[in-house]
Image (cartoon, rainbow, N blue to C red):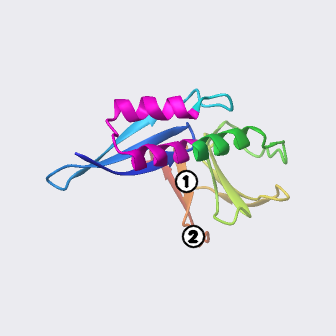
């Protein structure tokens, strides 16, 4: 078993180790680092992971430290992003079951228990189109990205 590469997972914070076996098959192992914050001692964390995963080479340990530093920077900076309510849209009579944005973010579509899907303009919140025809709850929907000119809806119709 040989470690091929490290992969980062930003949310929830973690590292994915990709191993290659003698028969050339590859397997991954996920390590969650949920308590990562600005006060985490990265050297001791890297040593602990390296010992548990038997990473005995110095370059692999150094690479692990670099990856943990990058992961911590991205995790900490994520906390300071400010989110705020931009627009509130309430067009359905019943609760929503799904929502999807097109790739550019200009439009979004919602699905509901009222058996409809509605297309909205993201910036203004104005409704562009109502899709009707399902005989049961619309439970799933999607745009055909990257084009975004078609919408697929899913229901348990018979």
Q: Which mark is residue 146?
A: 2
Q: Where is residue 114 drawn, in percent x and y?
A: 63, 42
| Cβ atoms under marks 1 and 2 closer than 8 Å | no
Most prominent secondary structure in the magenta stretch? helix
Name the residue at 73% across, 37% down.
79
Q: Is residue 107 visible?
A: yes
Q: Can residue 139 be seen in this view?
A: no
Name the residue at 54% across, 47% down.
66
Q: Is residue 20 magenta?
A: no
Residue 149, placed above or below residue 67 = below
Horizontal side of 53 relative to 38 (left or right) equals left
Q: Nearer the viewer, residue 88 or 60?
A: 60
Q: Nearer the viewer, residue 109 or 19?
A: 19
Name the residue at 62% across, 40% down.
72
Q: Where is residue 142 drawn, in percent x and y?
A: 55, 57
Q: Image quadrant for the N terminus?
A: top left
Please rate how many residues cluster around mark 1, counting C-alpha atoms within 10 Å: few if below 14, some from 14 to 19, many from 20: some
Q: Where is residue 129 drawn, in percent x and y?
A: 71, 62
Quarter of the rendering containing residue 50 = top left
- What range is drawn magenta here? 42-68
Secondary structure, mark 1, is strand
Quarter of the rendering containing residue 17 = top left
- Residue situated furthest left in the rendering: 23
Q: Where is residue 136 drawn, in percent x and y?
A: 52, 43
Circle 1 is placed at which residue position? 141
Residue 28, placed above or below residue 54 = below
């Amino acid at each position: 078993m040989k470690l091929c590469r490290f992969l980062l997972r930003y949310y929830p914070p973690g590292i994915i180790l990709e191993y290659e076996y003698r028969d050339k098959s590859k397997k991954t192992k996920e390590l969650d680092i949920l308590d990562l914050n600005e006060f985490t001692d990265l050297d001791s964390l890297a040593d602990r992971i390296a010992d548990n995963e038997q990473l005995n080479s110095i370059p692999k340990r150094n690479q692990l430290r670099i990856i943990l530093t990058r992961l911590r920077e991205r995790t900490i900076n994520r906390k300071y992003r400010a989110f705020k309510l931009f627009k509130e849209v309430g067009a359905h009579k019943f609760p929503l079951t799904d929502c999807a944005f097109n790739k550019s973010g200009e439009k979004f579509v919602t699905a509901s228990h009222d058996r409809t899907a509605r297309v909205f303009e993201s910036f203004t919140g104005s409704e562009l189109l109502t899709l009707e025809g399902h005989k049961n709850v619309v439970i799933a929907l999607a745009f055909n990205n990257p084009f975004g000119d078609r919408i697929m809806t899913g229901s348990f119709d018979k």
